[in-house]
Image: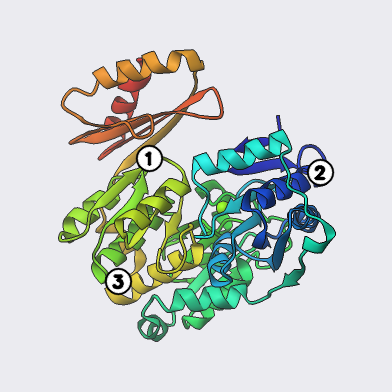
Amino acid sequence: MSLMMSVSGVRGIIGETMTPVLAAELGLAFGSHLGGGKVVVGRDSRPSGTMVQRALVSGLMAAGCDVVELGIVTTPGTALMVGRLGAAGGVVVTASHNPKQWNGIKFLTPQGYAPPPDEAQRILDRYRAKQFKLVRVEQLRAVAPDDSTHEQHVSAVTAQVNVEAIRKRSFHVVLDSVNGAGGVGGRMLLERLGCRVTHLNAEPTGHFAHTPEPLAENLTGLCDAVRQHGADVGFAQDPDADRLAVVDNTGRYIGEEFTLALCALRMFSRKPGPAATNLSTSRMIDDLAAAAGGACRVIRTSVGEAHVARAIVANGCVVGGEGNGGVILPDVVLVRDSFAAMAIVLELLAIESKPLNRIVETMPRYSMIKQKFDLDPPKVAAWLERVRREAGDGRIDTADGIRIDWPDGWVHVRPSNTEPIARVIAEARDEATAQRLAGRITSLL
Ligand code: MG
């Protein structure tokens, strides 16, 4: 059961399910789906990266693709290069926040974001049916390296923020790159913004210094370092550097939900406009949009990065993302980007002229509860119907499971598409109310 294959990508364990055969066939499937053309390939720093990438590239070439290899780069960096090089698509070899025995393969569209579920499904169907379009020798194309990703990404991000204002403050930043792909470019970005950088786990070796998901329990080293150095802020990237967690100047992990909220706070003031996020993300962003007024509002989407990215494009959003620390700054790239998030948080600090803990104190405060239950697929419909009847005067959104918003809080109920489980997320002003709301829904199971 170590192979996870879904519309959000493929992940498996090295030595078990993530094999060169799988990678080559996924390369063949994606190359055949595209019908050839230029494909940009990046990988995170995992020790298995070269092995998986070479097999994947072999498959892409056999389907007639022209391949550009970016080396060890971030997911947002790869997405940016898809656009810069006018490619037909991109692939990132990464298992994101999974431990190092995992690796994975994630496809990108020519727009540089994850393919929408129907397209992703067509690629997987093609892989399963082995419908590969092999080209003859005359149609085989080249592989070329490109080592400009970090530089191009950093330039794209700094073009979007007030570099002067940030540089003036000479912020001391502790960056934990978990020995992932984000260290080289992340440090380059912070130095270009005039920051003094204390860099933890900076080497892109893929030997992750701690459990790589940027959650509180994995970032005690970062929190300690921020306190010891009296730094202004701590940042933690995940191995492919799309997600960012933030630690305040007192060494407190403020929670991944705050990454998007802090960026939205800045963007609503600098470039007022709509924001997009998924239905499971905190209400903080709605409060910030309401306080900003004018064109600022929040569009809610189904869970999944591709849904958020498409809503950003369709509504001309100025910012978007997810409550897991994934911020999308569409003026840079249409995937979650820890570089853009770091730059916007630093700009917020520079403009507000207050320490981060003081800014966080002024923000709306909520308690969020996340629960997961086993649920037989045949029972899903009846349960959702009971949940719907529980809504009373609440506002209902059924784009992805059911979300009900009441004045004092909300719940989002979401059966998984890939496993026999359901997720219940509840948020309210205080923990007791959040517990009560979640209990109301789970008692209906
Ligand atoms: Mg990631």
Please give the name of the residue rendered at 77% of the width and 37% of the height, measured from the top-left corner.
17
Type of amino acid under label 3: Lys
Q: Which mark is residue 52?
A: none
The quarter in which the N terminus is drawn is: top right
Q: Is residue 143 left or right of residue 149?
A: right
The answer to whether residue 252 shows anywhere in this view is no
Q: Position of residue 410 (x, y in %)?
A: 27, 34
- For label 2, count other residues whose C-alpha is less than 10 Å away and answer few (under 14), some (14-19) or many (20+): some
Element at label 1: loop
The answer to whether residue 362 shows anywhere in this view is yes
Type of amino acid under label 1: Ser
Q: Which mark is residue 354?
A: 3
Type of amino acid under label 2: Val
Q: Which residue is mark 2?
A: 21
For this rendering, which residue is in front, 178 or 153? 153
Q: Earlier in the sequence, mark 1 or mark 2?
A: 2
The quarter in which the C terminus is drawn is: top left
Please give the name of the residue rendered at 80% of the width and 53% of the height, measured from the top-left corner.
55
Element at label 2: helix
User: Do the CB atoms of the residues marked 3 and 2 lie less than 8 Å apart?
Assistant: no
For this rendering, which residue is in front, 8 or 287? 8
Q: Which mark is residue 280?
A: 1
Q: CA distance from mark 3 to mark 2?
A: 54 Å
> Height in image: 272 above or below 192?
above
Q: Nearer the viewer, mark 1 or mark 2?
A: 2
Please give the name of the residue rendered at 62% of the width and 42% of the height, measured from the top-left corner.
123
